[in-house]
Image (cartoon, grey):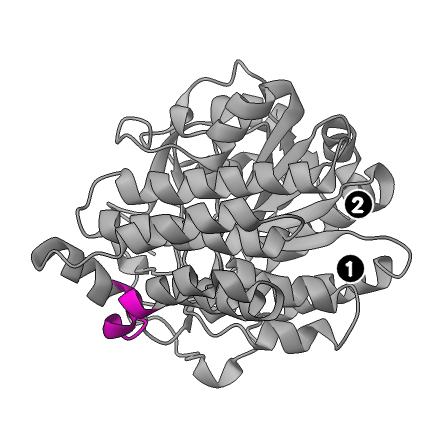
Amino acid sequence: MSHFRELAMPLDGPASLDPLIERAAACRVIMLGEASHGTHEFYQWRALVTRRLIEEHGFSFVAVEGDWPDCARVDAATREGPDPREALVAYDRWPTWMWANEECVDFARWLRDWNRTATVGFHGLDVYSLWESMRAILVHLREHDPGAVGDALAAYRCFEPFGEDPQAYAWATRFVGATCEREVAELLAATRMRVSNSLDLAQNAEIVAGAESYYRAMIRGGPDAWNIRDRHMDETLARLLDHYGPGAKAVVWAHNTHVGDSRATDQSAHGEVTIGELARRRYGADQVLLAGMGSHRGTVIAAPQWGEPMEVMGVPPGRPGSLEDVLHATAPPRALFLLPDDLTEEISHRAIGVVYRPERERWGNYVPTVLGERYDAFLWFDETTALRPLHTARVDTREPETYPSGV
């Protein structure tokens, strides 16, 4: 693995990002990944890269793996109004720590200062916010187009029996044949006919349609739900680029498993696509830069089960033979890699989700990866620390109870 040693460029401050910034300057879309949603260094360096792209190369907006309504509040706060911290504290969908953290506050405050003389947006790409988007549509129509409220109310009332519980709706579609598909289709068609210059109204209608499809697919299993979500994020990104006009350029923040090209992993074999692959197809590989991130060991914010309270967990060293193990042995503690196309050897690469069980490291948490095809660049941090959540009362800081043997 001597090629990693030769490719490594130490990261020791914003200026050390110069090779990455120079390569990104000519691209239309920069996607910055992360190996977990709970790591301080990933958020910190992602913000540093993004700031330089905005300051030096006029990037138009940041689009994140987050809900549109929540991010719309942050976007508004970065243009005018209260401290962006208030908008970030208001994130209440689990996992709150993904965006309700001090690292995002730091970036949003910088963006507000930047926007005193510019207009750079902050937007959510995700599809989860069914009920929030329904309410946003109703509020908009009641104020601006009362004649269209009927279709929105019909869709909203169809979902009411499920108490804003997507699992309840998903199971109902599977076992009792209850579905709001027709009402949502009618709402989307009516909204598309009436939309003039309201990106927010149009996007919330697309989210309602996408979320309804996503929750129906989720209960069936297989790749459909994943693909509905990533295709929705890809279409939202395209909609934003159109909205910002000719010459618009985007920075995307999402997990490595979305940013990386699925064709270079076993995701493709499972029938999954990613926004990284879709962007390369839509805009051309020369107009897209995909950057992943990873680390060897440290701490992370995650939860042991879906919906459970977040904890500060220990991240054990990368398993033998993994990318993380190899870079620990060959790279500087912090390094930047610009990856050549001929880096075609497959290697396992760690992915930590919002649900994480460190004791399963021996057989889980790793994605087979052809690194030079999955990413264009990679940022490496040998040891990392947990994010600083805003909802600190919900953090359990106990030491992990178990580690893989030998750690």
User: Would you identify the image quadrant in which residue 302 lies?
Assistant: bottom left
Residue occupying the far top of the picture: 342
The location of residue 287, given as percent across then percent down, is: 66, 24
- Between discs 2 and 1, the one toward the N terminus: 2
Residue 111 is marked as: 1
Magenta stretch: give its range.
157-166
Return the residue found at the far right: 117
Instruction: Report if residue 60 is visible in the image.
Output: yes
Q: Is residue 158 magenta?
A: yes
For residue 379, side relative to residue 368 (left or right):
right
Residue at x-position 34% and y-position 59%: 356
Q: Looking at this view, is 332 or 269 the one in front?
A: 269
Instruction: For residue 254, say whether it is visible.
Output: no
Number of disc labels = 2
Q: Residue at x 15, y 61 (%)?
A: 172
Instruction: List the residue tagged with mark 2.
Output: 54
Q: Position of residue 386 (x, y in %)?
A: 53, 65
